[in-house]
Amino acid sequence: MKHITIVVSASEMAAVRIAVFTAGANKLVIAPVSHRTCIGELGDWYCGTPTARREDHMRLRVTSDDNRSDDIISAILSTAHAAKIENITPVFRSVGTA
């Protein structure tokens, strides 16, 4: 299992959500990103443009199987006009848990 954390503009969030589930995501958590956080963490990546200053941004945390994570990343990059993949981390389960 892997967690993939992405930031996209709110206007693209619905399309990205559909794309990641079509690609095989197991779970998706959506949270708004404040403008202060957007400018502080993402800097000139996208939030510094005049258009982006007027838009809201969303952070999506996708959980997927290891064998589907590449398809999900591809779906994100082909769907979103501008997206930042913040991190991709493996999920380790301890022995004996379901």
Image: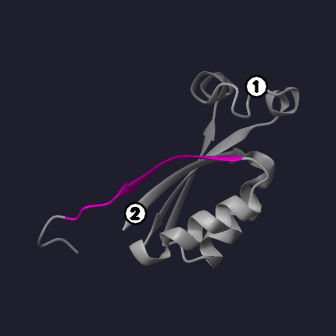
Against 59, residue 70 (above or below) is below
Query: How far is mark 1 from mark 2, CA to CA?
Result: 30 Å
Dot 2, crowdedness within 10 Å: few (<14), some or many (≥20)? many
Quarter of the view holding residue 77: bottom right
Dot 1, crowdedness within 10 Å: few (<14), some or many (≥20)? some
Quarter of the view holding residue 35: top right
Left or right, residue 18 beside residue 52: left
- Chosen colour scheme: one colour
Q: Nearer the viewer, residue 84 or 8?
A: 84
Residue found 70% across the figure and 70% down from its top = 18
Residue found 58% across the figure and 49% down from its top = 6
The answer to if 16 sits in the magenta stretch is no
Say which mark, if any, is on residue 5: none
> Amino acid type of disc 1?
Gly
Against 95, residue 43 (above or below) is above
Which tag, 1 or 2, sits closer to the chain's start? 2
Q: Position of residue 95 (x, y in %)?
A: 12, 70
Say which mark, if any, is on residue 48: 1
| Residue farthest toward the left in the current orientation of the protein | 96
Against 18, residue 48 (above or below) is above
Q: Position of residue 67 (x, y in %)?
A: 43, 77
Residue found 73% across the figure and 30% down from its top = 47
Residue found 81% across the figure and 36% down from its top = 55
* Quarter that holds the N terminus: bottom left
Q: Position of residue 68 (x, y in %)?
A: 49, 75
Q: Which residue is mark 2?
A: 2
Q: Position of residue 70 (x, y in %)?
A: 52, 69
> Amino acid type of disc 2?
Lys
Left or right, residue 69 beside residue 44: left
**Label 2: element kind:** strand
Left or right, residue 48 beside residue 75: right
Span shown in magenta: 83-93
